[in-house]
């Protein structure tokens, strides 16, 4: 049986906010890629992304994907982190999703994303929370 520590280390990078930093040109790629699109370098070091950023493109999903039926309207946003990396995340704790605006400061929290009602499975990932 695996120890919890080992399991944690083996989580995919989307659970740990790990990105690849090109050792040649310094570009940070998230999700990591095999070849740097900026300089075609193939050597990377692993860096952890900052958790703070701001909203660059808020969206409200009104037709929910399967499993999110109870969460619509579902606020989603492209968030630019403080190091310039952009990622699309669900926004948590929004009483009124229409209030989400470009420029809103947010930080990322590790949250339950989805629950499989029949199997009772929980899915975790990062959500943005407004500061
Ligand atoms: Zn590069």
Image: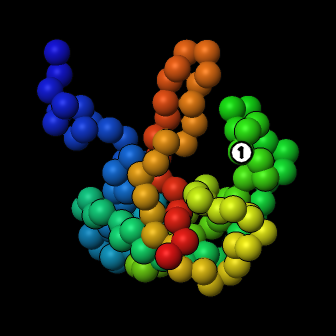
The residue that disc 1 covers is: 71
For the point 34% across and 51% down, which residue is it? 16
Name the secondary structure under disc 1. helix
The quadrant in which residue 102 appears is bottom right
For the point 53% across and 63% down, which residue is it? 128
The residue at the far front in this view is 95
Query: Could one spot residue 20 in this view of the protein?
Result: no
Q: Is residue 98 left or right of residue 111?
A: right
Q: Nearer the viewer, residue 34 or 47?
A: 47
The quadrant in which residue 130 appears is bottom right
Q: Is residue 126 left or right of residue 78?
A: left
Q: Is residue 45 above or below residue 5?
A: below
Q: Nearer the viewer, residue 75 or 44?
A: 75
Badge 1: residue crowd in 10 Å (few <14, some 14–19, many ≥20): few
Q: Is residue 70 above or below residue 43?
A: above
Colour mode? Answer: rainbow
For the point 28% across and 64% down, which residue is it? 47
């Amino acid at each position: 049986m695996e120890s919890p520590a080992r399991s944690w280390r083996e989580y995919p990078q989307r659970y740990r906010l790990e990105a690849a930093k090109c050792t040649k040109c310094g570009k940070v790629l998230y999700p990591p890629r095999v070849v740097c699109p900026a300089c075609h370098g193939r050597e990377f070091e692993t860096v952890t992304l900052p958790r703070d950023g701001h909203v660059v493109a808020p969206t409200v999903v009104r037709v929910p994907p399967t499993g999110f039926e109870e969460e619509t309207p579902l606020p989603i946003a492209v968030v630019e982190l403080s190091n310039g990396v952009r990622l699309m995340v669900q926004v948590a704790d929004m009483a009124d999703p229409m209030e989400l605006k470009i420029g809103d400061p947010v930080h990322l929290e590790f949250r339950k994303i989805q629950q499989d009602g029949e199997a009772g499975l929980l899915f975790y990932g990062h959500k943005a929370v407004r500061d």
